[in-house]
Amino acid sequence: MRERLRLLIAGGFYYSGLVKLALWLKQRRGRRLIILNYHQAGGNLQAHLRYLRRHYRILHLEDALSELYAPPRKRQDPRMPLVITFDDGYLDNYVYAFPIAEEWRIPITIFLIPGFIESGRYFWWLAARYLVQHTSVEKVTIDGRTYHPAQTRERGALAQAIDARLRYAQSVTERETLLDQLQIELGVSLPERSREGMDDPTLPLSWAEIGEMEQSGLVSFGAHTMHHPVLACITDVAELGNEIEECRRVLEARLKQPVRMFAYPIGKPEHIGLPALKAVKAAGYAWALTTIEAVNTPYTDPYLLGRLPGDITQHWLVMAAELAGLLGIVSRVKRQKARISLVRLNRGIGHILFNLLACLFLPRKLLGMACAPFGPESDQKRL
Ligand SMILES: [Zn+2]
């Protein structure tokens, strides 16, 4: 009901000309860059892109960032610049988004995780739900609590417990070992590209598909770590550096061109931490993207760029009204909170200590709950 009402209001804004007026006023407020952050393709993506290409100047991410930080100059096309990014490298980016990008000549950027491309394994943040849905064991014990997956009311709690254990692992080895154990205990094999081929669009892209998209000149690629850990929870500094540096090295070797863009996994300040921020700078990246909901200006820190969520379940009219600033008061309050966290991250040590202590000492279940309410992220879509 609430969604229907939002759609009705958004339609009113659009067809009365208010969206266009608000956009025009925004364009006059100085240089701004909107970076949209999608994950999976499909849903209403085509309708989103149809609207965006008419009302925004869609650019390659590198071109848009170079333009944002260069001295201002008058442009013939006064529309606000906008960039479309996809995180994680889902197969559906190739199957669904790439043909649209080709047909309409829209540039897109995909942030890749080489470890998953190489292994073809199921993304870990989708694993908890899959394991719980497909298990037929009578009971399983996690962190001393026994769950009965056959009982509907226990399934959600079990999925949450598994997800928290995977999410807040202190190393990739810990996470992968746990995943292997869970598959054995629950009697479920997670999908893999080697078995599923093209049948499951939530699996990772292959190098061949990435190569084909790169050849088109419409798709550029950035780094998203080797294995997508929550960087703030990695306790070994050498592993942290490796996740960030090795990713760049592997991608450059495969793509045969410099990789200068990085996107932090999950991407809120509490998931990043100061050591990761320093490691990204040390690894030679020129820009790094968060998921902090903010529009960028020439004064934005190039290593803490903001992005607005692209939600393929959202109607394009609602998206248009939100981007124009006419809807989404709740989102703006969240953005304000995120900005406060950002200041803390820049100031550093107190926030890092908090993250470290939280990862080490808070009960996993509590951590899962504490870090869950980031909108669709908790719905396993925005990682
Ligand atoms: Zn991600």
Image (tube, rainbow, N blue to C red):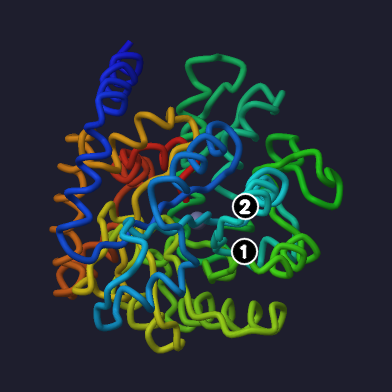
Residue at the disc numbered 1: 219
**Residue shown at 69% from the left, 35% from the top:** 186
**Residue shown at 15% from the left, 42% from the top:** 333
Q: Position of residue 306 (x, y in %)?
A: 30, 60
97 sits left or right of 330 in the view: right
As helix, strand or loop, the secondary structure at mark 2 comes to helix
Q: Position of residue 199 (x, y in %)?
A: 80, 39
- Say which quarter of the image contains residue 189: top right
Q: Position of residue 152 (x, y in %)?
A: 54, 14
Front residue of 380 and 286: 286
Q: Residue furthest top?
A: 1
Mark 1: amino acid:
Val
Question: Considering only vertical position in the picture, is 189 above or below 112?
Answer: above
Front residue of 232 and 94: 94
Question: Considering only vertical position in the picture, is 320 above or below 154?
Answer: below
Quadrant placement of the N terminus: top left
Residue at the disc numbered 2: 101
* Callout 1 touching callout 2 (CB < 8 Å): yes
